[in-house]
Amino acid sequence: MNEFSIICRVLGSLFNRQPQDPLLVPLFTLLQDGKLAQSWPLEQDDLLTRLQQSCDPQALATDYNALFVGEDCRVPPYGSRWQNGPQEAAVRQFLQAQGMPLSEAPADHIGQILLAASWLEDQDETADANAQKTLFDDYLMPWCGAFLGKMEAHATTPFYRTLAALTRDAVQAMREELAEQPDE
């Protein structure tokens, strides 16, 4: 797994799962112990330190639910709920065309899109980056800035405000890295 994939997998998991989900225990342990920063490929140490200082999964559950869960959530995590965001069916069709196995969960969820970017990266390191560029340009970038801004404004915990800033910087850095790769 390369650096791009690690970033997408960590961020996607934090958005895609409740903070108290047992599958996130190893990730929160790395955060709490300050060990995620050791393998984090971007220069975001200050943001990772802020995450570390506020990463009690049980305390984050209320904020996560208010931000992302239910029809009346403060910050819908689905691209189809945002202006310029993709429709769920379009994201699903694109990912299936890439060969990605999908569950019944909405494919336009920001966590799912980030996990899909990791999956695309892990498929074949020698493959061209066109699928990843399309995923970023058509299905993530048009709406994630507004989503992250609203998340930052409505989060009640430092963890989710910091996660918004960390994600914004990481998505931009990853898109810049993709721009450096030739189209095929």
Image (cartoon, rainbow, N blue to C red):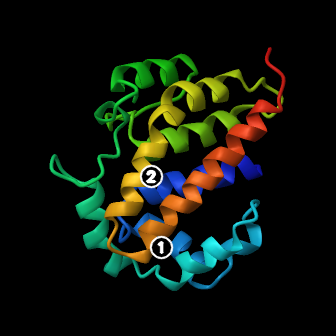
- State the SS at label 1: helix
Residue at 48% from the left image edge and 73% from the top image edge: 25
Image location (x, y in percent) of residue 151: 38, 57
Task: Establish if 2 lies above or below 153.
Answer: above
Is 76 situated left or right of 16 in this image? left
> Disc 1 residue type?
Val
Front residue (pair 79, 127): 79
Residue 125 lies, with reference to residue 35, above or below; the image says above
Q: Which residue is mark 1?
A: 25
Kind of residue at disc 2: Leu
Q: Which mark is residue 183?
A: none
User: For the C terminus, which image quadrant?
Assistant: top right
Residue at image position (37%, 75%) is 157
Whether residue 34 sits left or right of residue 105 in the image: it is right
Location of residue 80 with respect to 165 vertically, above or below: above
Distance from disc 2 to disc 1, alpha carbons, whole Å, reads 24 Å
Nearer to us of marks 2 and 1 is 2
Q: Please report whichever mark, 2 or 1, sits nearer to the chain's N-terminal start.
A: 1
Determine which residue is flagged by label 2.
148
Residue closest to the eye, 130 or 97 = 130
Q: Is residue 15 left or right of residue 129?
A: left
The percent position of residue 59, horizontal first and vertical second, equals 33, 81
